[in-house]
Image (tube, rainbow, N blue to C red):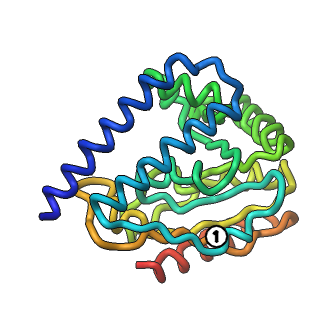
Amino acid sequence: MRLLRSTLFKVLFYIWTGLFCILYLPLMKLPRDKLIACQRFWSHGVLVILRAVMNIKLEIRGIENIPAGGSIIAMKHQSSFDTFVMHTLVRHPAFVMKKELLKIPLYGSFCKNTGMIPVDRDGGLKALKRLMQQSSETIKEGRQLIIFPEGSRSIPGDKIEYQSGIYGIYKFTKVPVVPVALNSGVYWPKKGHLVPGGTIVFDFLDPIEPGKDKDEFMNTLEDEIEKASILLL
């Protein structure tokens, strides 16, 4: 039964995504906020399919911890689910993402047109400076900068070393960082079939205020996210 439901969900997911891409093509030149609204509509559609086919619900905790205006949201990363659902939770998300993703047909164009921030991991100091500048400009526009400090998806319960790039953004922009714990990988795993009948929880924790040094910030961020994520398992 799990295999059947998971397969049905994936089929409907790709049909819905394909239809969205076809409809999106003539809208490619719309203003950024309109394109993000289109992404939000698609994301809501995925949530509807997820609930109808897999009986998986979404519970949001602590959304009030996101400061008004621009901010940084640092998320645990366990699932593909994490990369799109934020469009339904914040108004103008801007993801820090691998530059290689921009090469994906249509998706890459969408990311460019909606102001996502590509990272060149091999670009050295020049790439880092560009990341700082783009992050600062994004936050000044009142957008929520979303970053996955682990750098890649992890299996629930596993621990991946956090990348220190987020500290550079935190120090440069001088805005709060909101840690986010989650359990999405339990129901929408990195590999294999989805697990029906559960609740994906996103827990927005208390913001880490500006002014901490590197060690204190990184230790606080990792400790809070990991402890809260384990509790959600």
Q: Nearer the viewer, residue 18 or 150?
A: 18
List x then y, in percent, for residue 210: 85, 63
List x then y, in percent, for residue 122: 57, 32
**Label 1: element kind:** strand
> Which amino acid type is shown beneath numbered disc 1?
Phe
Q: Residue at x 70, y 65 (%)?
A: 178
Tell me which corner region of the image, top left, top right, bottom left or bottom right, holds residue 222.
Answer: bottom right
Tell me which corner region of the image, top left, top right, bottom left or bottom right, holds residue 137.
Answer: top right
Q: Can residue 173 be seen in this snapshot?
A: yes
List x then y, in percent, for residue 82: 49, 54
Q: Nearer the viewer, residue 122 or 166?
A: 166
- In the image, is residue 214 above or below residue 138? below
Quarter of the figure that contains the N terminus:
bottom left
List x then y, in percent, for residue 110: 56, 27
Quarter of the figure that contains the C terminus:
bottom left
Q: Which residue is mark 1?
A: 204
- Label 1 crowd (10 A; few <14 / some 14-19 / many >=20): many
